[in-house]
Image: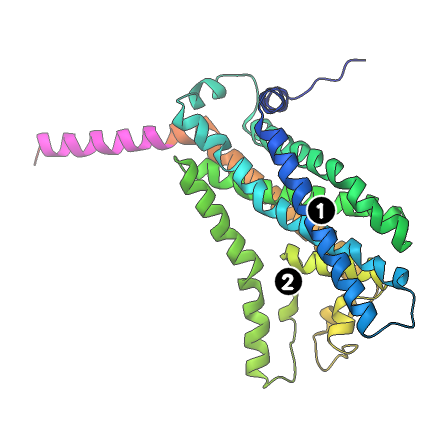
């Protein structure tokens, strides 16, 4: 049985494979990971010589995993919007957007194809970085299942970042404007989600956070912090950071979500649903029926105004 591939994915992957930018991008990616690995290894060795000279250094090499994983997550979050933001706005600049809409593909299939093609390109980078990542598992003693879970989190982050980029690309006519708008939304999600928590602490004079921490469920940075805590220590980041939160310090829902792995899975679900919402908004904007309906209504309004001006009472 032949699997039918989305034409958008097929076209984007063919264009990417023929370009040297992918090879140079992989080379730069490997260089950054190697430098991060060597820097983390030097810091661990220096700390071991200074404070833990009587202990075995190999027991501390497990921390190479979160360092390399954080570097990869940062690179993915940085380059995915740059990849997806020009997807639709670039078609508008090349004046091929109307041609793309004449195909048999639905608007959501076009948007989904653009996002999936970006995720596949990111997986090329993740696969290229696996040999360096594997050193932390071979030397540090981590379970190989952690590598599989990390790949899933990278895919989730790629889908989320790609959905933001494609949504901004659908609303902007210029690629530069789409990239800038993508990072503005990044700022709102990554930074401003802490504002309710800060305001809650200020209001209660540092005694209670209430349910304001629920806004952090859509923050990918907090999600990755929780993921690393679960992998490295098996505990929740909120329980450790808040000295085992009690019900007086946080709200009822936050207290129960901070127990076990509930927060991590619920945060992943919220991030995925938010990414789906961005893709649906982009598909709605790309849909030619909506744009044509707006044009028709504008033409009718202008015709009515002209008739009123030509035939005054």
Q: Write the start and end of the magenta stretch as one range.
A: 294-310
The picture places residue 11, in percent across and down from the top left corner, at 59, 20
Query: Considering only vertical position in the picture, is 267 above or below 170?
Result: below
Residue farthest to the top, as pictured: 1
CA gap between label 2 and label 1 equals 32 Å
The quadrant of the rendering that contains the N terminus is top right
Task: Tell me, yes or no, whether the two marked residues, 2 and 1, touch with CB atoms within 8 Å.
Answer: no
Judging by the rendered image, the residue that carries numbered circle 1 is 34
- The verdict on residue 177 being magenta is no
Query: Considering only vertical position in the picture, is 77 above or below 196?
Result: above
In the rendered structure, the answer to whether residue 308 lies left or right of residue 254 reads left
- The secondary structure type at the circle numbered 1 is helix
Query: Considering only vertical position in the picture, is 272 above or below 13?
Result: below
- Marks 2 and 1: which is nearer the front? 1
Judging by the rendered image, the residue that carries numbered circle 2 is 216
**Residue at the location (22% across, 32% down)?**
302
Other residues around mark 1 within 10 Å, as few (<14) / some (14–19) / many (≥20) = some
Query: Considering only vertical position in the picture, is 263 above or below 178?
Result: below
From the viewer's side, name the closer residue of 257 and 158.
158
- The secondary structure type at the circle numbered 2 is helix
Find residue 85 and name its label: none
**Residue at the location (91% across, 54% down)?**
141
From the viewer's side, name the closer residue of 301 and 52.
52
Q: Quadrant of residue 47?
A: bottom right
Other residues around mark 2 within 10 Å, as few (<14) / some (14–19) / many (≥20) = many
- Specify whether residue 261 is in view: no
In the rendered structure, the answer to whether residue 123 lies left or right of residue 298 reads right
Label located before the other in sequence (2 or 1): 1
The picture places residue 155, in percent across and down from the top left corner, at 71, 41
**Residue at the location (48% across, 29% down)?**
287
């Amino acid at each position: 049985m032949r699997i039918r591939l989305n034409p958008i994915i097929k076209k984007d992957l063919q264009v990417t494979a023929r370009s040297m930018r992918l090879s140079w991008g992989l080379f730069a990616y490997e260089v950054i990971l190697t430098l991060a690995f060597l820097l983390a290894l030097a810091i661990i060795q220096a700390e071991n010589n200074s404070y833990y000279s009587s202990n075995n250094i190999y027991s501390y090499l497990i921390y190479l995993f979160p360092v390399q994983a954080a570097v990869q997550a940062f690179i993915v979050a940085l380059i995915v919007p740059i990849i997806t933001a020009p997807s639709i706005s670039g078609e508008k600049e090349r004046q091929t957007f109307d041609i793309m809409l004449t195909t048999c593909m639905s608007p959501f299939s076009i948007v989904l194809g653009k996002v999936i093609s970006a995720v596949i390109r990111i997986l090329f980078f993740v696969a290229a970085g696996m040999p360096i990542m594997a050193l932390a598992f071979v030397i540090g003693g981590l379970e190989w299942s952690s590598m599989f879970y990390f790949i899933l989190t990278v895919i989730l982050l790629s889908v989320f970042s790609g959905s933001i980029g494609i949504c901004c690309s659908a609303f902007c006519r210029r690629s530069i404007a789409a990239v800038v708008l993508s990072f503005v939304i990044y700022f709102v999600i990554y930074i401003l989600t802490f504002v309710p928590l800060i305001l809650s602490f200020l209001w209660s004079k540092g005694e209670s956070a209430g349910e304001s921490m629920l806004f952090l469920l859509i923050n990918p940075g907090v999600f990755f912090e929780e993921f690393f805590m679960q992998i490295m220590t098996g505990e929740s980041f909120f329980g450790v950071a808040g000295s085992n939160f009690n019900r007086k310090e946080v709200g009822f829902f936050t207290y129960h979500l901070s127990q076990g792995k509930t927060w991590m899975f619920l945060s992943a679900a919220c991030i995925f649903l938010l990414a789906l919402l961005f893709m649906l908004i982009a598909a709605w904007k790309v849909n030619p029926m909506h744009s044509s309906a707006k044009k028709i209504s504008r033409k009718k309004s202008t015709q009515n105004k002209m008739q009123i001006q030509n035939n005054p009472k």
